[in-house]
Image (cartoon, helix red, strand yellow):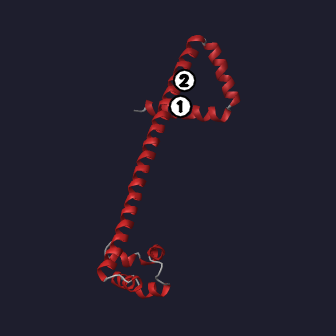
Amino acid sequence: MNDDTFAGQWKQMRGTLKSWWGYLSDDDFEQIGGQKDKLIGKIQEKYGYSWENAQKEVERRFNEADSAASGKLSGAVEDLKEKAYEFGATAASKARDAQAGVLSGFETAGSYFKTNDFENMAADLKGLIRKYPVQTTLIGAGLLYFIARNKHR
């Protein structure tokens, strides 16, 4: 983690830093103020480390944190890929079901036309018009519009 990133994330990191280095007080964190060199100096002072050991400890902790964050991100990406695959499989399955339903509807309509004569179909149509007068009127008006529009082409 570079110094700019460290300074930018200072407030979010304070809780994690307190868990790593419990001897550092809130006053110490205020004095450090997001400066990596000051953190190394405080760790050197509180824990009795040499400057090099304190610096290595800080780098080790930050590298572990970066690795953990990177691992979480790659895990999230894998989860997202899995969800996308599941979504695609579900969508494909529903599309196949819908296609089967449409084909079944055509087969049913075909068998209806084969088994009924014109008088029975006319009676069924009258029943539909009586049951759904507004809807059938709108459908009829739409059909007339398209027929009239296509005649003028």
- Residue 105's disc is 2
Depth check, front residue: 109 or 32? 32
Q: Residue at x 38, y 84 (%)?
A: 48
Estimate the spatial distance between the alpha carbons at disc 2 and disc 1, rounded to whole Å: 21 Å
Q: Which quadrant is home to the N terminus?
A: bottom left
- SS of the residue under disc 1: helix
Give the left or right position of residue 57, taking residue 84 as reference: left
The residue positioned farthest toward the left in the image shown = 52
- SS of the residue under disc 2: helix
How many C-alpha atoms fall within 10 Å of the one at disc 2: few (<14), some, or many (≥20)? few
Give the left or right position of residue 124, taking residue 147 as reference: right
The image position of residue 67, as x and y in percent, is: 36, 62
Depth check, front residue: 145 or 15? 15
Q: Is residue 138 above or below residue 53?
A: above
Q: Amino acid at mark 2?
A: Gly
Depth check, front residue: 97 or 47? 47
- Residue 143's disc is 1
Q: Residue at x 45, y 84 (%)?
A: 29
Give the left or right position of residue 29, taking residue 120 as reference: left
Verify CB contact (< 8 Å) between mark 2 and mark 1: no
Depth check, front residue: 44 or 30? 44
How many C-alpha atoms fall within 10 Å of the one at disc 1: few (<14), some, or many (≥20)? few
Q: Is residue 76 above or below residue 95?
A: below
> Of marks 2 and 1, which one's residue comes earlier in the chain?
2
Q: Amino acid at mark 1?
A: Leu
Q: Which quadrant is home to the C terminus?
A: top left
The residue positioned farthest toward the front in the image shown = 48
The image position of residue 69, as x and y in percent, is: 40, 63
Q: Nearer the viewer, mark 2 or mark 1?
A: 2
- Residue 93's disc is none
